[in-house]
Image (cartoon, rainbow, N blue to C red):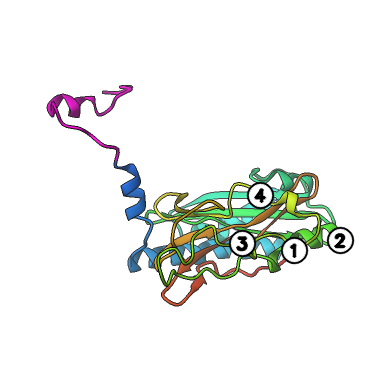
Amino acid sequence: MAGDPLPDRGVRAALPGTELTDAQMLFWQAKQIKSPREIELIEHAGRVTAAGLEAVMELVRPGVTELELSAAAHEAMALGSDWVGHCVIAAGPRSGLKHLYPTPRPIEDGDLVFMDMGVHYQGYFTDTARTLCAGTVAAGARSCSADWTCSKLSSPRPARARGSLTCRTSPRALPRMPGYGAHYWPTGFGHGIGTNFAELPSLHWKSETVLQPGHLFALEPMIVIQGLGCGVMEDQVLVTDTGARSLTPARKKTW
């Protein structure tokens, strides 16, 4: 019944005396390990998304508007996907506010340019990001982007024994630059991706999920500084039998 606050009421009425249990978590757990066909589809979507990132990185320069960057990304991604899922372009002080949609604002010399985009392809999503500096690179922008890129998580590896590596194991995830730890994004450093934009595994400090071959997630540790910008390089990462590999073949260009 439309608007029914208890959508399973009809089932309960038809099965009196039966106990119904919420199986939502079982569903999420079952779909987190990707099949070879799923990996193939997400890898294709990753290549399409990388084309959008590359188009923006080639065009970024002072004087170009956020909307022009967005148009270039859409053009690069549209032919290889069902649709463009999202395309966030924010530059200068706006980039420190993260997920903002593009405006006619021209890029200024020294701006940090944050781009976060993804596509939908045959039922599967992507979610990727890059940050780079336009024109003259100021010291603060250099630290927020280049040094942060070097201090990303060490490559995830599958567990050899239960509990040997969980989604919270990340000793190299903290920024190496003195004074930047307070700006580290506190809610986690990634999320699973597939037929939903965000699914298991959830990558955060308290997660007990053991990484296994077939886990596929968007890895996105970041620094966010309002008034300066956002430092992040986000890839789709697949855990394999021997380690991990990126499914986002776009450069990690910082200026």
Q: Secondary structure at mark 1?
A: loop
- Please determine whether, in this image, residue 249 is positioned above or below residue 130: below
Residue type at the position of mark 4? Trp
Residue found 39% across the figure and 64% down from its top: 41
Q: Nearer the viewer, residue 58 or 214?
A: 214
Determine crowd level at label 1: few under 14, some 14-19, many 20+ residues with C-alpha closer than 10 A: some
Which label sits in the foreground, 4 or 3?
4
Q: Secondary structure at mark 4?
A: loop
Q: Is residue 138 visible?
A: no
Q: Secondary structure at mark 3?
A: helix
Which span of residues is magenta-colored? 1-22
Residue 176 tag number = 1
Residue type at the position of mark 1? Arg
Asked if the magenta segment contains residue 11, the reply would be yes
The span from disc 3 to disc 1 (Cα, nearest Å) is 26 Å
Q: Secondary structure at mark 2?
A: helix
The span from disc 4 to disc 1 (Cα, nearest Å) is 14 Å
Q: Is residue 83 visible?
A: yes
Which label sits in the foreground, 2 or 3?
2
Along the horizontal axis of the image, is 21 left or right of 189? left
Residue type at the position of mark 2? Ala
